[in-house]
Amino acid sequence: MRIVLRLLVPVLLVLLWWTTSAGSTSPFYPPLREVLAAFQESWLFTRLGSDLVPSVTRLLAGLLIATVVGIAVGAALGRSRLLMQALNPAVQFGRSLPGTALIPISVVLFGIGDGSKILVIAFVCLFPVLLNTVDAVRGVDPHLEDVARSYRLTPAQRLAFVLLPAAAPQIFAGIRTALGIAFIMMVVTELYAATNGVGFVTLSARNSFDVPQMWAGTVLLGLLGVALSALFLVLQRRVLSWHIGMTERN
Amino acid sequence: MLSVTNLRKTYGSGGQAVEAIRDLTLTVDKGEFVCIVGPSGAGKTTMLKCLCGLLKPSSGTVTLDGAPVTGPPKEIASVFQDYSRSLMPWFTVQRNVGLPLRNRYRSAADRAERVATALDAVGLSGFGDRYPWQLSGGMQQRVAIARGLAYAPEILLLDEPFASVDAQTRADLEDLILRVRDDTGVTMLLVTHDIDEAVYLADRVVVMSARPSVVLETVPVDLPRPRDQVTTKRLPRFAELRAHVLTLIRRTALDGAAPTPDQHSTIGARR
Ligand SMILES: Nc1ncnc2c1ncn2[C@@H]1O[C@H](COP(=O)(O)OP(=O)(O)OP(=O)(O)O)[C@@H](O)[C@H]1O
Ligand SMILES: [Mg+2]
């Protein structure tokens, strides 16, 4: 029953699209039938390995770097008032920079390869993770820190068994925000200067007036976004199962 | 031997300073069972935190076997007052109890065995795989006690450990603590609001004044051991001691340094 309800609106929207576009003569609004044909031709599965995989790899690499660096630096900043005071202006500056503005610089400095794109994605994703980690680490219940200290846990044990688990729910919220940004940056970095990727293929299709191909690329991006966010939720549910259980109970 | 000499603790400074403890001197001998009673807000938790090296006294000294306590000593385990916030909600009961043992026992099997024994002692054998938030308040407090026991300390500090359990469980846990003391010879320092409990458990009851606190009196408890919930509490001597401690507390609660209306009502039956 629930699954029917969930699928109802998407199916209706596709039907709407199908009917309104079926007789379309506008070259920019091709019939859905043609879009699906283009989709099948490119993405099932000729360009999957050559364009989709590189896109997703760059996204995940950038997000992973941002997560690792963001948690490490964020935990340090959350612990040390002094460090936070010293680095806060730089952090505020970095987070206010629009990510897209970094692409030209990154291209000039590091070229148009994967490294340059991953760097931009990582940089932009860093801030939500970092700032959430700072906040979360500061909010850890002092009672738990008393317990950790009185039972003489080592600093590493305190980090691994007390601080990070306590901060995890908020860190995950930061990563979730970062994932959304990473997705946008993945596409944008491919529009500016690229040799492969879903964004690149979609833009090239527009430039060569292959309109159905352009629509197909956009559809793929939509599906990819939904899939990534669903995967993230699965991961989150596994790691934070205790938190979900506890919240549901209260 | 744990001793505190002229302990003073003031929180904050300037106009907002709170003088919690004015002057406390106290010695707890090896193997002794000392109970501390005092009005709410007297500074009992503050004192325990100074004793176990979590708080730095404003002045005075804390020594353990002659050596000054500057940080949490490995001989001391604490059961904190706020049990629900002293357990890690991301760990199962087993892992909570086993966490402090990591630096004591290399082998996971040894740790598991100690954890199982401690959980068994507090009557939570079947609950190792549960999470703290799946348990009742009283059960959570028993997990915190089990964590202290598993650590096999020389001194166990307990801050109102039975405040949130029903009367029957409370009696069971009191007897459990007495049994552990007999079996292991661990030194016990227990804070409570319940005067019956203090007299029933202790070798000595230390009565603290209202804030800023001093030791009002140390009452030796000359009741025979082993103690028994029914026969010990029926002794005329028990009633005498109980009445004596109660009188002391009533008085300090009424004319303590900074009495507040709720201070009397909290003696004996808190929360
Ligand atoms: N971190 C703190 N900062 C400022 N004041 C504090 C702090 N902790 C405790 N106090 C104050 O010190 C006094 C003693 O507090 P403490 O918790 O030690 O009392 P207690 O005897 O344990 O009380 P209870 O029986 O209610 O647990 C109280 O007036 C309290 O408000
Ligand atoms: Mg207290």
Image (spheres, coloured by chain):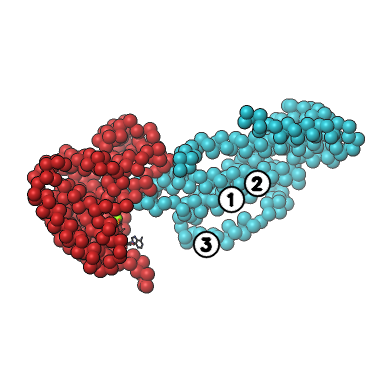
Chain colours: A cyan, B red
Please give the chain letter of the residue carrying mark 2: A
Real-space Cα separation, disc 2 to disc 3, in angstroms: 27 Å
| Left or right: A63 as drawn, with respect to A245 | right
Please give the chain letter of the residue carrying mark 3: A
Which three-letter amino acid code belongs to the residue tagged 1? Pro
* Earlier residue among tags 3 and 1: 3
Q: Is mark 3 within 8 Å of ligand 1?
A: no
Which three-letter amino acid code belongs to the residue tagged 2? Ile
Q: A197 or B203: nearer the eye?
A: B203
Q: A132 or A152: nearer the eye?
A: A132
Mark 2 crowd level (few <14, some 14–19, many ≥20, 10 Å Cα): some
Instruction: Assign a secondary structure to mark 1.
Output: helix
Q: Which residue is mark 1?
A: A128
Q: Which residue is mark 3?
A: A86
Mark 2 vs 3: CB contact within 8 A: no
Q: Which residue is mark 2?
A: A181
